Image: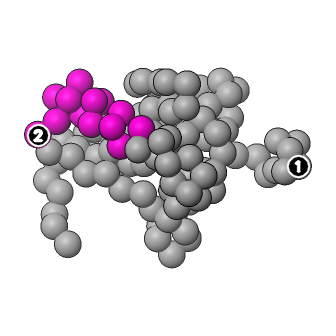
Amino acid sequence: MSVEEREFCVFCAIAAGDLPADIVSRSDDVLAFRDLAPKAPTHILLIPTEHYANAAELACARPATAAQLISMAASIAAEEGVGDGYRLIFNTGEKGGQTVFHAHLHLLAGRGMPGF
Ligand code: 5GP
Ligand code: ZN
């Protein structure tokens, strides 16, 4: 499917530089930026620059990029001073709480994280 045929994707627009974002880190394949509506003092989103609908599709198509989301999250957590405790979340599918259908990893820290 070409970019023109696909529905507008807010994270593709951020990756392309067409929408502003508070960017924290980037590589060729991954972009990290602060969540617009943070749910914790540190709330950063890490996305593949290429569009995949969710983490499972990304992991099947680009396993190295999926791994890079996690390793970059660890580096950012250390840089933000929260390397000793943080939460990583992939909401997957509507019933899993996903609202933006471009794969993304939430990095949350800086407040108590209740266990399940
Ligand atoms: P989901 O619910 O899909 O797991 O998470 C989507 C996240 O993207 C939400 O935490 C929401 O606040 C964030 N978000 C949605 N639109 C934007 C945007 O335009 N810019 C930024 N920085 N974050 C966004
Ligand atoms: Zn996208």
Q: Position of residue 46 (x, y in %)?
A: 45, 39
Q: Main secondary structure of the magenta part?
A: helix
Which kind of residue does numbered mark 1 sit on? Glu
Q: Which residues are magenta?
A: 68-84
- Reply yes or no: does residue 31 show up in magenta: no
Q: In the depicted view, which residue is nearer to us: 82 or 62?
A: 62
Q: Position of residue 113 (x, y in %)?
A: 17, 57
Height in image: 89 above or below 42?
A: below
Q: Which residue is mark 2?
A: 84
Q: Which residue is mark 1?
A: 5
**How many residues crowd mark 1 within 10 Å: few (<14), some (14–19), many (20+)?**
few
Disc 2 secondary structure class: loop
Q: Position of residue 103 (x, y in %)?
A: 55, 51
Residue 45 at least partly seen: no
* Disc nearer the start of the sequence (1/2): 1
- Reply yes or no: does residue 71 show up in magenta: yes
Farthest bottom residue in view: 95
